[in-house]
Image (cartoon, coloured by chain):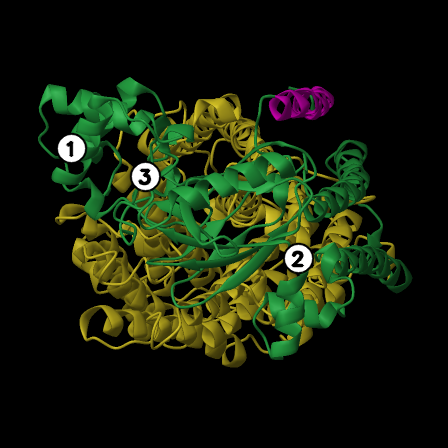
Chain colours: A yellow, B green
Amino acid sequence: MATISVPQPKQTIPWTSRGIMSWITTVDHKKIGWMYIAVSFLFFIISGLLALLIRAELSAPGMQFVSTGFYNQLFTMHATGMIFLFIIPFFAGIGNFIVPLQIGAADMAFPRINALALWLAVFGGLTMFGGFFFEGGAAAAGWTSYPPLSNATYSPSIGQDFWILGLQLIGISSILGAVNFLVTVANMRAPGMTWRKIPLFTWSVVTAQGMVLAATPMLTGALTMLLTDRQFGTRFFDAAQGDPRLWQHMFWFYSHPAVYIMILPAMGIVSEILPVFSRKPIFGYFAIFVSTVLIGVLGFTSWLHHMFTIGSNPVVETLFMATTIIIAVPTGLKIFNWIATMWGGSLNLKTPLVFVIGFLSMFLIGGISGIFQAAVPLAKQLHDTYWVVGHIHYVLFGGSVFGIFAAYYYWWPKMTGRMLNERIGMWQFWTMFIGMNITFFPMHVLGMLGMPRRYADYAEEYGWTFMNQIATFGAFLVAFSTLLFIVNVIYVHGFNKGERANDNPWEGNTLEWATSSPPPEHNFDRLPPITSDRPLWDLRIRKLGIQTKDVH
Amino acid sequence: MSLRRIVRRQLLWLGGVIMLVGMLLPNAVAAQSPSPLDPASPNAALIANLYWIVFWMSVAVFILVEGLLIYSAIRFRRRSDDELPVQVHGNNRMEIAWTIGPALIAIAVFVLAWQVMLADRPPTAAGLSPVSVASVCFNNDVTPEEAAAFLAASTLTIEIVGQQWWWQYNYLDYNFTTAADLYVPVGDVVVLQITSRDVAHAWWIPQLGGKQDLYPGAVTFSWFQVSRPGVFEGNCTELCGASHAYMPMRVVALPPDEFDAWAQAQVAKNQVNAIAITNPSPQVQQGEQVFVQKGCVGCHAVGGLGINAQAGPNLSNFASRRQIAGIMPNTEDNLRSWIVNPSQKPGARMPAIPIAPDEMDALIAYLDTLE
C-alpha cells in the first residue's frame, strides 16, 4: 500500500534567507524589527565613537585632537545619533518584533507602511551623517539647534540643512510607525486579550507611540520653519521679526516627551523581565499601567523646564516646576512596585535580570538628579552645565541603554534561536555598570564646579582636569563593554558556540514564548487561551497541577 | 562568582565612589573652581542653601531605595530550581502609601524652591511686591512706575552686550564702556540689563547667582550684590559657535572707595577729547600712531580714541585685564602672538595685520600703559 506522503509545511524562519533582496523588499514585522535593531546598533557604534573622540579631547586642557568647530559637530551628531538613530529606532525595532507576538498577531496592521517607516529612518540617518562628507562638515549647532546659531548666517554649512532634512525623514518615519503600532494593538489582539490583559511592555510601547504621534508633528513643523528660514528667507525664528525662543518652545514640546518616548519602553522591558525572573506576577499591574500612561500625559506638560533661563514669567516657571516635579510621583510608584515584585520572589540572576537591576539602580540616580533641575532656582545654576550632561546620561544610559541590553539578552533566544553567552554577558554588565558610573558621575561634580556643557576646551586653573580624566577613562571602559557584547554575538553565532534556545528558555509568561524560537513567518500555529496577563503561567501551572498561593 | 561576592564588591565600590567624591569635591572647590556652592551674593547663597537641603533629602531617598534594591537582590535570589514564591498580585494600601510618600517629598521640594524664588530679589526692591519685581525682571506686563521703582532700587545698572565671543559692559550710570572684566563695588545692588548682538549666549557667574540667557532683540535682567572683594569667574553657558569655550566673563569686586576711584578714572579717560595716557614716552606715542595707522582703532576704542568703535572690545583698561581674547593670560609674549595670529581663537574676526618689529614693540608698549 502506497503511503501518501503529506509534505510537511516547511517552517520558514525569516532570517535564514540570505538573499539581500528578501531583506530589502520584506514587509515581515520580524525582519523589519531586525533591520531596525541592526541599523540602530550601527548608529550606536558610530555615535559612541564620536563620544570617545569628545572624551579624548577633554582629557586635558587645550585642543589636542580636533578643532573646536569639529568638536561642535562631534557632540551635535553624538546626541542626535544616539537619540534619533539608536534609542528611538531600537525601541521601534524591538517593538516591531515583540509587540505582534505579545498580542498574538501575525504581523503589524500595515506591513508596507512598516517597511516605509524603516527605510525613511535609515535614509534620514544617512542624510544627517552625510554632512560629515561635505564642505563645512556636519551640523554643529547642538542637537537642540537653537536659532540664531542654527540659521543661515551663523551656520552656513550644508550639514545643518542635511541635519534638518534627515530629522524630518526620521520624524515622518516615527509618525507612520506610531500609527501602525496603535492600530495594531487596538485591532489585532488575540481573542480574549482585553485591555487589562495586555502585557506591560506592549502597554509601554502603546503609550510611547501615542506620545510620538502627538509630539513629533510639532518637531517636524519646527524643522520645516527652520528650513524655510535658512533657505527661503522666512523670519519665524528671526530676532527682529520673529522670536528665536519660539523654536525652543516647539523643540522642547517634542523633545521633552521624547525623553519619555525613550524611557517608557525600557520601563516596559523592566516590567516584563522582573516578574519572569522573580517567578511572581508584576506587583500592581494596574498601578504600573496607570503610572505609564500618566507619565505619558504629564510628559507633555513640562517642557519649559528646559528653558528656565530664557527669562520667562516666574508665575509660568512656578507652574512648570510643579508639573515637572509631579512626574516623580508615578515614577516613584513604579520603582517601588518593581522592588515589591522582586520582594519575596525567586530571583533568577541571569543577564536580563542583572541588566534590569542595573537599570533600577542607575535610573534612580537620574530621577533624583532630575528633581534638582526641576526646582527653578537650582535649574538656574545647573542648566547647561556638566551636571545636566551627567543627569541625562544616567537617564538615557543608566535607564534606556541598560533596558536595551536587558531586552537584547532577554529576547535574543526568541529572535535567533540561540542563547547569548552568560559569562561574557556578566562581564559586559559589570564593565558597563562600572564604566558608566566612572564616566557620568564625575560630570555632576564638574557641573557643581562650574563647567558648562558643550565645551571643547577649559582652562587649567578651574580645577576641572582631574574629573574630566576620570570621565574619559570611564568612557573607554564603556566602549570596552560594548565590544564585549559584539564579542558575545560573534562567539555565539560566528563560532557557533551558542546554546540552542528552546521555545521558552526563561519561563516567560507572555505569548511570544508560545511559539518557536525563532518564530515562523506566520508567528503562531495556534494560540493558548488568554486567561490573564500571564497566559503561559496559567497554562504551565495548571498543566502540572501545581497549587499556588495567590495574594491579590 | 558568587552573588554575595558580586554584591559585596558593588557595595564596596559604591562606598568608594561616595568617599572619593566626598574627598575630591572640597579640594576641587578650594582649587579656585567657580562653584555655585561657594556663593558671594545673597541670591547665590539662597540657591546653595536650597541645593544642600535637596541634596541631603536625595541622599536619604537614594540610600533607602538602593538599599531595598540590593537587599532584595541578595535576599531573594533563587536557591533551588523548583521554588514557587507566593503569588502577590499587588497591595492597594502599600501602593497608595508609596504614592503619597514621593508626593510629600515632591511637595516639599516645590515649596522650598518656591520660597527661594520669592526671596530671590534685590534687597533694595523690598518695597515692591514679589510679583512686580518679577514682572520687571522678566519684562512682563510691567507698568512704567514699577519699572522705574525697580531700577531706582539698584545702586548700579550695567548693560551687558554679549557677542561672538566677548562681553561688552556699558556703565549706564557713568557713560563709559569696557569689556571682559566687569568692575563692581562690594555691597551694592548691581542690576544687569542683558542683551546679545548676534546669537544666544548665557551670562553665568556661578558664585553670584543663576545664569541668564541673552538674545538679540530682547533684554533680560539679572542682579547680584557681591558680599566680599575678589574676582569671580564665569563662562558663557549657551552654545554660541566655534569659540563657545573661549568666552569667559569675570567680575572684579572692589571696595566701594576703590571702585569709585576706578570709575572716575574710566569716566575721565572716555571723554571725547581725553588723553588716555599722561606724559607718554616717545615709544608709547609711536605705539599710539601704529594703533591708529594700522586701523586697530576702527574696531577698538581706547578712551576718546575711536570712541564709537564697537566691533571689537574697548581697550581703555586693557593692561589691567587678566586675559587676551578670553584664550590666554595677558602677558607680553602672548600679546605679540595674538596680534600676529588672531586666528588662534577659532572664528575670531580680528584680521592679522602685517607689522614691523619696531612697530610691534611700540604697540605693545602703548597697550601696556592702558591701565
Can residue A352 be seen here? The reply is no
Magenta-colored stretch includes residue B359: no
Look at the image and tell me in which quarter the N terminus of chain B lies. Answer: top right
Asked if marks 1 and 2 fall on the same chain, the answer is no
| Residue depicted at 26% across the width and 27% down the height | B366
Q: Is A129 on the left-hand or right-hand side of A535?
A: left
Judge depth for marks 3 and 2 and give the one in front.
3
Please say if A509 is above or below A465. Answer: below
Could you tell me the amino acid type at mark 2?
A: Val
| Residue depicted at 36% across the width and 50% down the height | B240
Which residue range is magenta in the image? B4-30
In-front residue for pair B306/A358: B306
Q: Is A213 on the left-hand or right-hand side of A338?
A: left
Which numbered disc covers residue B275? Answer: 3
Q: Which residue is mark 2?
A: A376
Q: Which residue is mark 1?
A: B290
Could you tell me the amino acid type at mark 1?
A: Val
Classify 10 Å Cα crowding around label 3: few (below 14), some (14-19), many (20 and above).
some
Could you tell me the amino acid type at mark 3?
A: Ile
Q: Secondary structure at mark 1?
A: helix
